[in-house]
Amino acid sequence: MPNTLLDPLVEQRLRGLRLARRIYPPRTLGLAAGGLCIGSALLTLATPGWVWMLWVLQIATWSHVAYWRAKRHASPYHAERQNLGIDSLLGGFWLAAMHFNLLPTIIVLTMISLNNIAVGGPRLLLRGVGLLALGGLLGMWLIAPGAPPIIPTTGVLLCSLPMLITYPLAIGYITYLQARQLSRQKRNLTDLSRTDGLTGLYNRRFWEAQIAAELLASSPAVIALIDIDLFKHINDEHGHGVGDETLRELATLLRQSLPPHFLLGRYGGEEFGVLMPATKLAQAEAALHAFQQRLHRHAPPAPLARMPTCSIGLAAKAPHMISHEKWLLLADQALYAAKDAGRDRLEVARSAASQSLLDLG
């Protein structure tokens, strides 16, 4: 499948939306589990009613408001960074509201810092620390906290466990999903880098690299160059769309007709290549003769009356070959011999003795 390029601004917005969707579930979970942890600490204090109202409002609405805000923003990525800043600012306020209760304070600091560094690295972490401090100063000004308890009560300890257990597991699972997605993208990019976009066969660069590697193996091997006869007439008479469909049909027929261990490539234009490892010359001739016969019977794409014929040049690997270019040259010479002999033919390259003379020349 061809790679579809998007406008850079569109691609940037899509990346931002993906980030917002990725953060939405852990933020919702973090508010629920973290809210339980903070609420248990507030219960041990003389907490004003407006602080409880803010606590309920943040747990119930903030993750949804943050997600909605990112989706509607011109730049979802920047909106989500701002949302993380609000997370840090509010987190600092709750540290002061809890009178810096030691265990909940450590949990809130750690989880907010984890979010910041996961999205923006050290720079966002430092910004988050600054906003946490600012939120803490704001909370101290509004609430005037007392001395923090060093040893948490049983209630605070038990209510902190869900945050300690579930949130890291959620972050770990999200990281696992991201790693899987990155692995798929890497495989897709690898496939794109070695695949011809029109036919789905290997592109010339990758196919030639396999020939060079095969030259080092001790087993017999054969390569074939296949050229569609009079292909220019198809493009001239019916257009390049019909020509492209003909190339795709031929590529499909090659895959269906030849053994799966044969490596198929698009050599260029209307020319294809076949690398046949662990194959003797007689076996290669039989397989490609069968392909030619099948091609004669294959239904053509509209509006062609029949599929075009192919000329094929074969060359077997020989011990004296010092480069894969010489091997390809032999196959190319055999292909031109097939063309000169009237097309729709298969010709085999000259003998090893002739090739030795070519190397010396």
Image: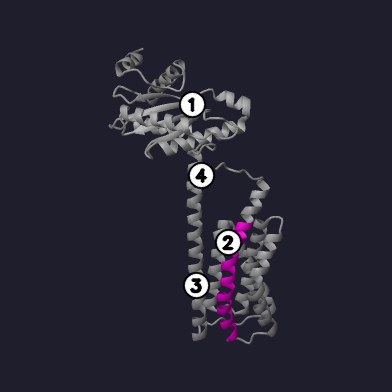
Q: Residue at x 59, y 57 (%)?
A: 123
Q: Position of residue 244 (x, y in %)?
A: 57, 33
Gap in angstroms between the C-alphas marked 2 and 1: 53 Å
Whether residue 284 is in magenta: the answer is: no
Q: Residues within 10 Å of mark 3 (few under 14, many from 20)?
A: some
Numbered circle sitting on residue 166: 3
In the displayed structure, does residue 235 sit left or right of residue 277?
Answer: right
Judge whether 121 appears above or below 132 on screen: above
Q: Is residue 283 visible?
A: yes
Judge whether 188 appears above or below 53 on screen: above
Gap in angstroms between the C-alphas marked 3 and 1: 65 Å
As shown in the figure, which amino acid type bears the numbered disc 1?
A: Thr
Gap in angstroms between the C-alphas marked 4 and 1: 34 Å
Q: Residue at x 63, y 53 (%)?
A: 14
Residues shaded magenta: 17-43
Secondary element under disc 3, as helix, strand or loop, is: helix
Secondary element under disc 2, as helix, strand or loop, is: helix
Q: Kindly identify which residue carries mark 1.
A: 309
Mark in front: 4 vs 3: 4
Task: Judge by depth and name the residue closer to the eye, 265 or 3.
Answer: 265
Gap in angstroms between the C-alphas marked 4 and 2: 23 Å
Gap in angstroms between the C-alphas marked 3 and 2: 17 Å
Label 4 or label 3, whichever comes before in sequence order: 3
Q: Quadrant of residue 142?
A: bottom right
Label 3 or label 1, whichever comes before in sequence order: 3
Q: Position of residue 55 (x, y in %)?
A: 65, 78
As shown in the figure, which amino acid type bears the numbered disc 3?
A: Thr
